[in-house]
Image (tube, grey):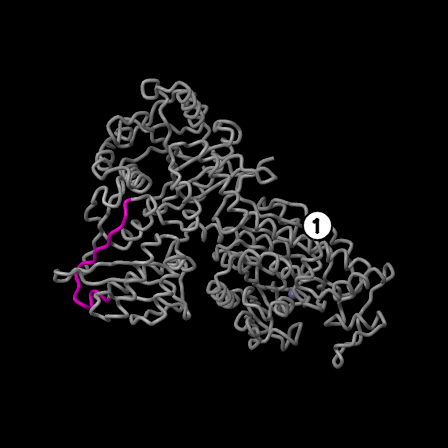
Amino acid sequence: MLRIRRIFDDVLPANRETLEQVKVILRDRFSEISEEEIEQLGEKLRNPFKQRFRPILFVAKTLRSRVKGFAMLLHEPEIGFCFLDWIATASGRTGGGLGGALYDRVRREAVDLGAGELFFECLPDDAEKCPDEALLKENRARLRFYERYGARPIVNTGYELPVNPGDSCMPHLVYDALDAVKPLRRAFARKVVRAILERKYSGYCPAEYVEKVVASFREDPVALREFRYIKPQAVKTTVNDRSIEQIALIVNDRHQIHHVHERGYVESPVRVRSILAELDKSGLFARLKPRAFADKNIHAVHDTDFVSYLKHASEDVPEGKSLYPYVFPVRNKTRPPREPSVLSGYYCIDTFTPINRNAYPAARRGVDCALTAAREILDGRRVAYALVRPPGHHAERRAFGGFCYFNNNAIAAQYLCAYGKVAILDIDYHHGNGQQDIFYRRPDVLTVSIHGHPRFAYPYFTGFEDERGEGEGEGFNLNLPRPENLDGERYRKTLGKALHRIEEFSPQFLVVALGLDTAKGDPTGTWSLMAKDFEENGRLIGTLGLPTLVVQEGGYRTRTLGQNARNFFRGLVQGHMKAVGNRQESKVRLHGVVFRYELQPQDPERIRRLTEITGFFSTAEVEVAVELVNERLAKGVQSGYHFVMAEHYGRLAGYACYGPVACTVSSYDLYWIAVHPDYQGKGLGRRILKETERLIRESSGSRVYVETSQRVQYASTRAFYENCGYRQETVLADFYAPGDGKVVYCKALT
Ligand SMILES: [Zn+2]
């Protein structure tokens, strides 16, 4: 069985491995692509918009994680089109079932993005244009395949003009109108063609060539080739919508055994059933079986003696009986009592969470579900949901309570944090004291909780605003207690604060402890959130655009549980897709950056580290960068080198070096601009450049010059300058090396 999955970046180890397999197929199937370009695949995904196209990679994987095929789509959001860069299968067949599934997925994505049309290149299927017999056969099969969707080559234009004399077998530009039958307008087509030639083939197509090809689009609408292989009425224009990225759903299949029949025990099996009934209808989810994980994952957040106590106490309780704690160690916490019925008070925080025969096995299975969901996230899934009970967020390192035994969300967060920073957002009505306790002294897991104020809400003794974390963890716990009455609108204000803190923390993963007891009418809460509020909250959380693991916590009004859960996820997915779709530099704001202009003695070393870590400069270039700093330190302003140092809480996040050009009245050179990888994609480069321009203007400078290489590797640099208003003035051909010219950009300051 194959599944098609989108790969968003190369940060996760699983994604890196997938990308390596994609590269193998690329090398194998497209011999004309340079190794340099192949190696940049990960970088492209991580920094969308570097080439002014947002790359979207889909891979078709077997269950054993072998990549069988992939498709790379480039989205251009400003003009509004998609370009299918590559589609390939390991076997080499694109027209078969796998190629078809990938192409369906690509079309679906293009429609979801609101890009009305899809373009791609296809080699010619005419014998006179393609002398290679085998290749010709392949090209024919391919164009026949696309014709089934109505996609055909654009004709009567100069798109197939050779770039260099002697070029043969030039590709057609193929147009797919997707789900609409609409003509291709000339003005639009010209923009599209310009974008493709200037960006995708930057450095290959000279400017005159681009102008010539763009101007060759004369007809309006632009004509497509007649159908050659199939009858027009056999065209399938509907876009397949079954391939939408689904949320992984892992349900605790042993939750039903945990059923406490005492009156008023609202944490009951019907909760899961009523949520499932609604989720199943939505089509948003793919059900997965929980897998078994070792106890060591639990021991990573809970004390060993506590875990073994729960296990044994649960086994020792007679069938059908419940053990409730009734004495608690206010004094003498260090001496566990012998008597089993008394011991439960040593490990529990309240009198209403019993231990019974099934508490341990049910809770243990819940942990497996949360970890299975975490594993899915590490595998590259963007949203996974562990629908579990008993819940977990009140379980502390060495205490259970509040219907909770093991802290599922904390165990999953601990599992994920081996791969990057994690933020836990607890949106249950009750304070998430469990994960607060577990991560209180740690800076790598941020815990945030929005809850009813402890002066009236369980667990009463924690959840105050001044609990901010301790030691290394100080500042990494945020409690947002709220008053007894709260509606959706006021809730969202608080949620906004929580999300702001999470953005600042910039984690790799988000864990949401999803309590639905904030809903109107919940028997354990006092707030009044409605169905639409859950959708809106989901959307806001989704806009973080983070891989998100949702773990079920509380929520007891069974009549609305399902609808609220479904709405939450609908919003979450929409917000998420939008965030990932719109991720532009300006979207991710970086707060707390300060500029300074005077150098300090430790700056040469800091600049060395910074320029090295970008991985962008050669050893010789790094030396030059350091030399300029030393020069400035030694000679001051006389050196002619000026600096803009951008610091983020004392850390050097980026810098620029510039100076007046000798023998000119008011021209300046920008010598260096570099941004630490941790701060890339956040608009910092642009801000440093703006600050530099401001200083140059202040010194009566009027023109800024900057030079860069023509190589593919520098496409992002060139795009950066162009986006900042720099115009290409000239290209000194073969300047750095044969085929590697120097591009000179200039911006006139007004
Ligand atoms: Zn709750």
Disc 1: which residue: 292
Q: Nearer the viewer, residue 749 or 525?
A: 749
Q: Quadrant of the C terminus?
A: bottom left
Q: Percent from the top left, x then y, of residue 146? A: 43, 28
Q: Nearer the viewer, residue 384 or 298?
A: 298
Q: Percent from the top left, x then y, of residue 178? A: 42, 35
> For residue 462, which quarter of the picture?
bottom right
> For residue 712, which quarter of the picture?
top left
Can residue 377 be seen in this snapshot? yes
Q: Percent from the top left, x then y, of residue 163? A: 26, 32
Q: Nearer the viewer, residue 460 or 419?
A: 419
Q: Where is ligand 1, by quadrant?
A: bottom right
Q: Percent from the top left, x then y, of residue 452? A: 60, 71
Q: Quadrant of the N terminus?
A: top right
706 falls in the magenta region: yes
Quick one: label 1, few (<14), some, or many (20+) residues within 10 Å?
A: few
Tell me the amino acid under the disc marked 1: Ala
Q: Residue at x 53, y 29 (%)?
A: 97
Q: Residue at x 87, y 61 (%)?
A: 318
At mark 1, the secondary structure is loop
Q: How many marks?
A: 1
Can residue 430 be seen in this snapshot? no
> For residue 531, which quarter of the picture?
bottom right
Furthest residue to the bottom?
A: 331
Q: Name the side, left or right, on which 643 lies relative to 28.
A: left
Q: Nearer the viewer, residue 325 or 483?
A: 325
In the depicted structure, whether residue 465 falls above or below residue 488: below
123 falls in the magenta region: no
Which residues fall within the magenta stretch?
Answer: 695-710
Furthest residue to the right?
A: 318
